[in-house]
Amino acid sequence: MTELRAIMTDQGILQKKKNGDAKKALVIAVTSGKGGVGKTNIAINMAIAYAQMGKKTVLIDGDLGMANINVILNIVPKYNLLHVINKQRKMSEIVEDTEFGFRFVAGANGFSSIANMTQIELELFAEEFCTIGNADIIIIDTGAGIAKNVLQFIAAADEVFVVTTPEPTAITDAYGIIKIIATEMFDKDIHLKLLVNRVHSADEAKRISDRIINIVAQFLSFRIDYLGFIYEDPAVAQSVIRQKPFLIADPQSKSSLCVRHITGRLERIGIAAHAQGMQGFLRKFLKKS
């Protein structure tokens, strides 16, 4: 830890990244309190939406140990994050172009070692993260729940999107991860937003979001904003079976229109102003560790 912090001096990695970080990338972590709420599909299709808006976008499968983005995209990556952790490849070497307009960093599936990285390995990952290259938007699909690496990503991101559904268990678990963020994160100014997936109406989504937002404000004295909703839509399940993102397979579906609306709204409200770039990511990641 001491050695890596020493690298981050005026002559170290932060200084080295200064020129390449002039246009700061916005780092978004998409997370959830439980699995099965559609988090990964949302991360993938948001990456596509941003790419279609002309943004240089990188999608990272941060579900360490149980990665599956490559399956949904029908991609067989040559290298993944395990190669980086094992020092067999640099992060910049495992970034792949996709037919969907964004670049992709694959996680590893079925390796408990990468899901339970040591402190030194986490620090190596953070440093390698900063070598990804030129990007406007970096989206990290975290694992579900409160594992250490999930909280590291959340702590270091510029924006955190918490995904839930109308299911009582999903709502409870969403509140659980928000509570941990509110009470255990060093950065109390974290930009947290709630996205309600698989709803049947805008009113249903608003009722759920209002309930969570009000409880968070009342009991945690913490602010979370309402990002929006995505309709329950058979096009989503069909796209997974076809291994083709719904924004591509059915661009006029209700789910596709919702994702485009959300990313368009994010651009209009100017969340890129929160971007701290690679330097900020590394600094916050290490501070959390």
Image (cartoon, rainbow, N blue to C red):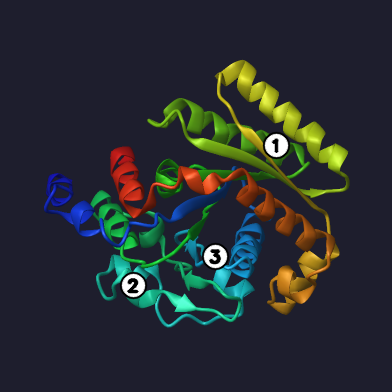
Q: Is residue 66 left or right of residue 174?
A: left
Kind of residue at badge 1: Ile
Residue at 13% over, 44% down: 2
Residue 40 visible, this orientation = yes
Residue at 14% over, 47% down: 9
What SS does tag 1 mark?
helix
How far across and how far down the image is residue 134, in percent? Answer: 39, 67
How far across and how far down the image is residue 152, in percent? Answer: 40, 45
User: Would you place residue 192 above or below residue 64 in this image?
Assistant: above
How many angstroms separate mark 1 from mark 2 (CA)? 37 Å
Q: Is residue 16 left or right of residue 25?
A: left
> Which residue is nearer to you in this view: 138 or 199?
138
How many angstroms separate mark 1 from mark 3 (CA)? 32 Å
Q: Earlier in the sequence, mark 3 or mark 2?
A: 3
> Which residue is nearer to you in this view: 33 or 9?
9
Residue 36 visible, this orientation = no
Kind of residue at badge 2: Ser
Q: Which residue is mark 3?
A: 55
Residue at 61% over, 51% down: 267
Q: Which residue is mark 1?
A: 171
Q: Earlier in the sequence, mark 1 or mark 3?
A: 3
Kind of residue at badge 3: Lys
Q: Where the C terminus falls, by quadrant? A: top left
| Picture disc at residue 121 | none
How far across and how far down the image is residue 230, in percent? Answer: 77, 52
What SS does tag 3 mark?
loop
Q: Foreground mark, 1 or 2? A: 2
Q: Foreground mark, 1 or 3? A: 3
Q: Earlier in the sequence, mark 1 or mark 2?
A: 2
Q: Which residue is mark 2?
A: 92
What SS does tag 2 mark?
helix
